[in-house]
């Protein structure tokens, strides 16, 4: 991706399903530091510890990030994302290594407004309850999170206050006024 030099006006980059993009390639992104939206869905070679570190370092303005279907993304990678202070939208659907520790970290993301955790099988009520601390959170999707119960979801809704507007669960949508 060394040909990206000079693209300082680029705001959005969609590399979805580009399976040959690597973490080394992501290190070239500083040439595109104005990017605010990045889609790396199914880029399993790119989204590693090294790749996440490159994103955090290179793209400080990132507001929307799709890391769904990236099997190497783990709790340590999510903790690194906390450095992206403007991150408002995060999609980590089907990232099977994520646990409640990731949700505890996400609760501290100051701008996080929309979160997709669909099919993250290691997520439970404990992590969902922690999301109540994410003060900007408006929407969370938990479809396929089978260890999340109605009790955990209701506790999140009650503790989150009025900012939370949408919760998607295996049982359907819950809309909170």
Image (cartoon, grey):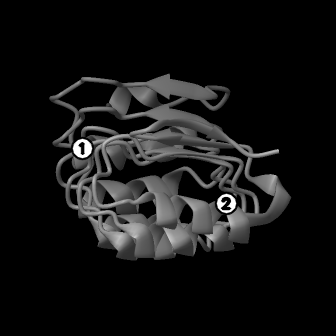
Q: In terms of depth relative to the viewer, which is nearer, 172 or 42?
A: 172
Q: Quadrant of the N terminus?
A: top left
The answer to whether any part of residue 79 appears in the image is: no
- Residue at image point 49% right, 26% down: 13
Badge 1 crowding class, 10 Å Cα cut-off, few under 14, some 14 to 19, many 20 or more, is: many
- Residue at image point 43% right, 76% down: 126
Q: In terms of depth relative to the viewer, which is nearer, 85 or 174?
A: 174
Above or below, 54 relative to 94: below
Q: Which mark is residue 157?
A: 2
Q: In terms of depth relative to the viewer, which is nearer, 174 or 65?
A: 174
Relative horizontal placement of residue 83, taking residue 26 as reference (left or right): right
The answer to whether any part of residue 59 appears in the image is: yes
Give how far across and how far down residue 172 sits, in percent: 49, 33
Q: Secondary structure at mark 1?
A: loop
Q: CA distance from mark 2 to mark 1?
A: 28 Å
Q: Quadrant of the C terminus?
A: top right
Q: Which mark is residue 70?
A: 1
Q: In terms of depth relative to the viewer, which is nearer, 16 or 75?
A: 75
């Amino acid at each position: 991706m060394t040909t990206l030099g000079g693209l300082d006006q680029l705001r959005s980059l969609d590399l979805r399903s580009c399976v040959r993009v690597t973490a080394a390639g992501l290190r070239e992104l500083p040439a595109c530091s104005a990017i605010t939206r990045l889609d790396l869905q199914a880029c399993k070679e790119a989204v590693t510890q090294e790749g996440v570190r490159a994103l955090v370092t290179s793209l400080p303005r990132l507001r929307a990030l799709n890391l769904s279907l990236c099997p190497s993304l783990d709790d340590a990678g999510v903790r690194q994302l906390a450095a992206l202070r403007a991150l408002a939208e995060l999609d980590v659907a089907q990232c099977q290594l994520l646990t409640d520790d990731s949700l505890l970290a996400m609760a501290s993301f100051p701008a996080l407004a929309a979160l997709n955790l669909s099919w993250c099988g290691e997520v439970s009520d404990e992590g969902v309850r922690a999301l109540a601390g994410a003060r900007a959170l408006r929407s969370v999707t938990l479809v396929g999170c089978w260890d999340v119960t109605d009790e955990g979801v209701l506790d999140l809704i009650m503790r989150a206050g009025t900012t939370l507007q949408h919760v998607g669960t295996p049982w359907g949508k819950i809309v909170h006024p």
